[in-house]
Image (cartoon, grey):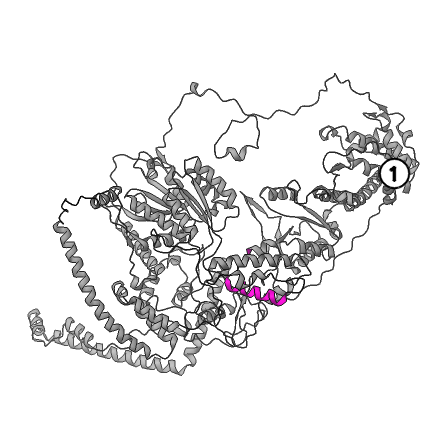
Amino acid sequence: MQFMRLSKLKERGCNFHIIWFDNHRDFAVPPDALEVNVHKYLLTRVVLIEHLRRPEPAADINPRSADLDAPMSFVFPSIASAEFRQYRSQYHLHLIMLSDGRPSELNGALETKFLGIMHLFAQHQYSLAFIDDTEFRSSKVYAHVATPPNCQIWIPVYEPFPFPRPDLDCRRVMERLPSLFLPWKNQRQGRATDAREEVAVIACASILLKKPSAVNERRVAAFLVHIALMNHIILAQRSCASPTKYDDPSGHNEFLEDFSNVAIVLVQLWAGTNIGRCTNWEVHDLVDGRLYYQVLNNLESCRLPVDLSPYIQVVRNLTGADVQRHLQHCTILPKPDPGLQVVGSSVPALPFILPFSHPVLDKYLEEIKLKTETLLNSTNLGYKISQELTHWHNAKKRVDPKNVTRKPPGYFARKRNQNHMADTIAYSASLTNASGKNINPEPVVVQRADESVQKKHHTALPRNKKQVTMSGAAKGRQEAQKIEARKLHTRSIAILKNWDNQCRNFEREQSVANRYWKVLSYLSNLSEEDKQSIGGEVFLYICNILSRKLSYRTHDKPFSDAAPDSRVPFRPDAWQRKVLDAIDADKSLFVVAPTSAGKTFISFYAMKKVLQANDDDVLVYVAPTKALVNQIAAEIQARFSKSYRHEGRSVWAIHTRDYRVNSPIGCQVLVTVPHILQIMLLAPSNAQNAKSWARRVKRIIFDEVHCIGQAEDGIIWEQLLLLAPCPIIALSATVGNPLEFKEWLAGTQKAKGFDLDMIVHNTRYSDLRNFLYQPPTEQEFVGLKPVERLPIPGLDAETGDDVCFAFMHPIGSIVNITKDSLDDASLEPRDCLQLWRTMINNQTDKYQVKKELTPELALPGLVKKSDTIQWGSALKEQLWEWMIDPRSPILNVCNELKPQTIKRNKTRVPADSTESTEVPNVISPASLSLLVDLRSRGALPAILFNYDRVGCEKILFKILQLLQNAEQIYKNTSRKWSEKMTAYKKWKKARETNSARKGAKVLRNNDNAKSKEDVQAAKDSGAAMTRADLARDGANSEISPWENFDPELPLRQFSFADTTKITQEELEERIRSLDGQGIRPSFIHALHRGLAVHHAGMNRQYRQV
């Protein structure tokens, strides 16, 4: 069973080693095995070790030759041995896969030993994967993994010492064997040698030397006969009945046990010799127990196919014993006549399969050679047209109904669509950081092909021809533009005066941080027209506030190989310009670039081209998740707008299994998920004529195309890539084998007549930094304090006594020093400078840093990011030369770059006495401390990741509980809060008294009236107060600051909610949309404090909010 799992791992391209420990060889013996059968399992273990071992290359063979297999099986004395320690330093293991040692399979003692082995591996900080519950789905492997504990207390585990088994002094016999003539010895082609005869002869000789007797001589004779038979008959012809009875069963078992002990020693000795390490010994067929017993019981009547004298002579030379006398009654069969045909049992022929050929798959199936049936003549076959008249979701409804008038959507359907649109617009405003929820999408106008021709013809008119006079409508538009320009000029003068007054107010602010935020708030409240007038002045004023002299001269500018391009409103890099050229040439694209490198703009440029072409072309954007679908749709809403001549048309639409927004057939940009696109492409009604939807699709964008490797939905992605009737754009950041995937994509696209270009960009635009957080352990959380700071990026940008974030240098965080881990380390410019300085400080006379790596020589005067990337690559090459030499100062460099120990004397939250103070738990108060420290550095909002759904909710509830408890303590003990509540109650009582007095006056005047005419006359004369009078009095009265005060709402110092992003009224309106959704109140309370949880099990409306 385990070897079947190993075979499946190999089929899926997993790289693994099989490790054996001699002091734990007892695990190869089943717990319920009899003592007389233990030797069989131990021999099987040694045979498997040799069978899985890969021989080392000989001296005349290149060790990097592609013909050599990588070593697979390794044997060590123990887990704590020096050999295994050296192996771990050479091969850096990601995890250890082993059995889980279930109690049903192991007894108590073995189970304890097995748990001890797990503990020893955990001490070395290895994760454990359990092979018993491994699941194989498609090309994926799923296994339960246990990570090593983060505790400092380890249980002492002592490994057993293996008890040596008897070897019958076979080493002396083996040393004499090379001096004898061995007629059967025949080296096969390659590096495999059959060791059956050597093992049999040495084992028989050792048994006769240690235990000479006539019985053992007869057993040796039978064993040699059985060896000769094994060399001349195949496995299928060895079928023998199980021996029912024979003389001296204990003696026969003892003989086989002695043979197994000798064979174990011989195989281990040969594998350790110089010749054995370069030779693969074939020991998988050393003995056949049933065949041996069959020969032993019928030794006097055997008819041998070959002469045994060579074996007998070698045994006689080694021991002096002659076993020929036990074979006197055996006869040797004559050699068969070469002209005779041997008739044997033939293997039944496999049935033929139907032939298969496909231009895309033939390349990958050419190694498979199978016999196929001959195709019949297709002209003699009759065809029957198959029509899909019903949808597979509903067999009663036709796919393409004719003459059916579609009813307009009902009230609730329209209401749902309006709600979805409102959510999308609000989402797009939040993505674009629009002020007042106002978005300004770019209006797209169809560019017709004849416009450029008319323009060229108009400019080429002869001089003697009169220019065409302007129409009345054109003159009206021109005059309106002049009037609008005069209004803007007048408005600009007024806004400049206002800006001058605002500047005086800003200068009165002493705090630079507060002044900066006030100016930024003023800028965000300006309209687009006002920003065009004084936006430059405001930005210049902000720059003047933030201006400072750099404390260091070496500063990397965020410049790369960018150049202006009229097709986009920014300066694209070289790889982005290649993408634009490929889209203009209607080519398919496979783009591999890291996150935030600029892949999304590719989609928007392709969308804009489709929108500008006409009103009918369609672009489909395929996203793997519904959250990404909503985000892309919101970005399209914020970016593009277009006017159509007919109803039912729109720029974009969403179509998922849960909901639809706009018409999927009437839009030009459809954002959907793979399953829906598959249904739409395969629907016959979408491909009936040239105007059908499937034929109007001009490009399909596959975002996160690496999802093709998923076990569940990977087949859908593969089918869509094969079904795509148009050029595609495949985007991904994490494709493991981009070249192979590109070849496959290029083959699929070439079959449809499209060329495919692959563009790879390995540089991140925004560098990632890793920090180590040290939470506090003492003081109690008393509330959030106001934060006054400038927007300086980086958690380590500010220095002070309370340093809780330690920067982790990519080189200092490397645990396994390998070439791959070094290449994966991403160095930003300051990391390169720090690495170079550290290498200079630790260089020795023998290990010098190359002079060309000096920043003055390696970098130009104006440093671009591309220059620092090349510099970082050169530093890595120098560092790798140090890594492969253990005598180099590489350890000093890594230790100096490791994060320093953080010591914090102040804390934010009370320590939990039940939890460890050395390794904080994410569900402990440390999570709140992390959020508080991030807030003080302007790093909120933040996302805390946890792979457990329940764990996510526990973190949320713990933070919410700490905030609520601290707020309640503040309300109970704060004198300021008590005075505030007293004033509020007093105001509330006065307002109720005033309202009651006015209501009574209205009621009294109305009651004095005898009829409706009297009431109307009283109102006309002013004697009675009307509702309008009450409203007028309320408008004239001063607005009290207590009007917006709600004592039930969370206080600002106990909430992470940013009231500048969304008003309290808007938040309450969104929370009311969750009524009736069955959401626990704790989640609602957390939303009021700016906290939320997000995972696949949460309510969709809650996730949308």
**Residue 877 in sight here:** yes
Relative depth, front residue between 372 and 153? 372
Relative depth, front residue between 149 and 479? 479
Residue 765 placement (x, y as % from top left): 45, 58
Give the residues in magenta. Answer: 824-845
- For the residue labelled by badge 1, is the local secondary structure a helix, a strand or a loop? helix
The amino acid pointed to by label 1 is Ser
| Location of residue 874 (image quadrant) | bottom right
Residue 244 placement (x, y as % from top left): 79, 33
| Location of residue 720 (image quadrant) | top left
Residue 817 placement (x, y as % from top left): 62, 57
Q: Which quadrant is the C terminus positioned in?
A: bottom left
Up-down relation of residue 530 to residue 46 (above or below): below
Q: Which quadrant is the N terminus positioned in?
A: top right
Up-down relation of residue 991 to residue 856 (above or below): below
Up-down relation of residue 276 to residue 876 (above or below): above
Residue 306 placement (x, y as % from top left): 82, 26
| Location of residue 184 (image quadrant) | top right
Q: Residue at x 80, y 21 (%)?
A: 335
Q: Is residue 97 left or right of residue 688?
A: right
Q: Which residue is mark 1?
A: 179
Q: Is residue 159 left or right of residue 304?
A: left
Relative depth, front residue between 1014 and 343? 343
Q: Residue furthest top?
A: 339
